[in-house]
Image: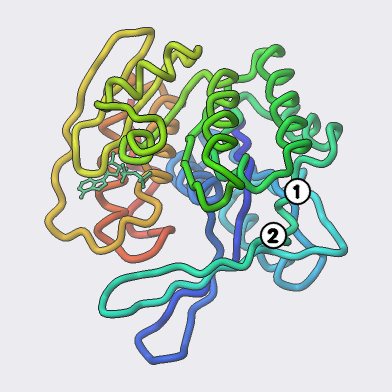
Amino acid sequence: MTRIVCIGECMVEMAPLAERGTYRMGFAGDTLNTAWYLARLLCDRAQVSYFTAIGTDGISDQMLTFLEDENIGTRTIQRRTDRTLGLYMIQLQDGERSFSYWRGQSAARTLAQSRPDLDAALQDADIAYFSGITLAILSDWDRETLMRALDRFSAAGGEIVFDPNLRPKLWPNANGMVNAIMQAAKLSDIVLPSFDDEATWFGDQTPLATAERYASHGACTVVVKNGPGEIVLLNDWEISRFTPTPMDDVVDTTAAGDSFNAGFLAGRIVGQSLEKAVATAAALAARVVSHRGALVADAVTCTDLSG
Ligand code: ADP
């Protein structure tokens, strides 16, 4: 059975309810969202686990319980006595959502402090999934420790999947961001970027240019997402294109890319062709954007995957 470990930060999410001043608490974060959709899609066809660092307090315990209830493995998660989870709050103003973050001192920022802990987490896996946000929250030193661990994992036959998820606000400067992203991409077998971010920070003129840039740095498979626009798949330098069915009722694009990544990987894991896996991914992401919130239970079941 395929074993996937997703590496990154899971935060507490406070989402506003209709009544002013009332919020619903949940858990979310880019790599966690992908893990959640993977577990929901694959059910007993794969083992999905999460690697991060959390506190030893009540809310950290609640997050562990949440992951375990979702069938996401937590065995290698690190506990820190002096830190806790990061938090974000969603504000709704005139129908627009904005986000405020409290994550500067989160436990997850220490997830790559120990080489043996990283090796232990990766030892159990066939596929490692991480993102540009995973890299952004780490110190330079810890980022290097993570990259080296992934390099060893790759040398031992592990497959690496990376979503660049460019978030300049999380980096001291844009140069540091683009260098770290390309360093990570070089280690990766599969890269799953989103075109608008890539065009802004790398100057790519087309989604194909984004795909070619990552392929020329070593990725075997690149899938470039582009909102409702055409998706480009470049596999061993062979190009395919896929137009998602446009959704008229888009209510919230949170986790569109994260769910897309899960759909693509899950399709691939159950043996779908890469083109079919892109279709699976786009169908899932289309359902996710037509619901509010990052984790949309109604958008996904284990029966969504056929060969
Ligand atoms: P990200 O969330 O990483 O910015 P995108 O916005 O590119 O990612 O969206 C990821 C995927 O979600 C797209 O490739 C597409 O399949 C799907 N998607 C996003 N917006 C729409 C839309 N308006 N209609 C249909 N599908 C969409």
**Residue at figure coordinates x 16%, y 33% from the top left:** 243
Q: Residues within 10 Å of mark 2 (few under 14, many from 20)?
A: some
Q: Residues within 10 Å of mark 1 (few under 14, many from 20)?
A: some
59 horizontally vs 48: left or right:
right
221 horizontally vs 141: left or right:
left
- What type is the residue that disc 2 sits on? Leu
Which disc, if any, is residue 222? none
User: x, y (%) of residue 69?
Assistant: 60, 59
Mark 1 vs ligand 1: CB below 8 Å: no
- Give SS at disc 2: helix
Quadrant for residue 117, please give it: top right
**Residue at figure coordinates x 47%, y 16% from the top left:** 219
User: x, y (%) of residue 56?
Assistant: 82, 65
Residue that carries the numbered disc 1 in the rendered image: 77
Name the quarter where the N terminus is drawn.
top right
Quadrant for residue 250, please give it: bottom left
- What type is the residue that disc 1 sits on? Ile
112 horizontally vs 258: left or right:
right
| Colour scheme employed for the rendering of this structure | rainbow
In front here: 304 or 218? Answer: 218
Residue that carries the numbered disc 2 in the rendered image: 64
Q: How far apart are the two marked residues, 1 and 2, measured between alpha carbons?
A: 9 Å
Task: In the rendered view, tell whether residue 240 sits above or below residue 4.
Answer: above
**Residue at figure coordinates x 79%, y 70% from the top left:** 57
Name the quarter where the C terminus is drawn.
top left
In front here: 68 or 177? Answer: 177
Q: Quadrant of ligand 1?
A: top left
- Give SS at disc 1: loop
170 horizontally vs 198: left or right:
right
Residue 1 visible in the picture: no
- Determine whether label 1 and label 2 are within 8 Å by CB: yes
Mark 2 vs ligand 1: CB below 8 Å: no
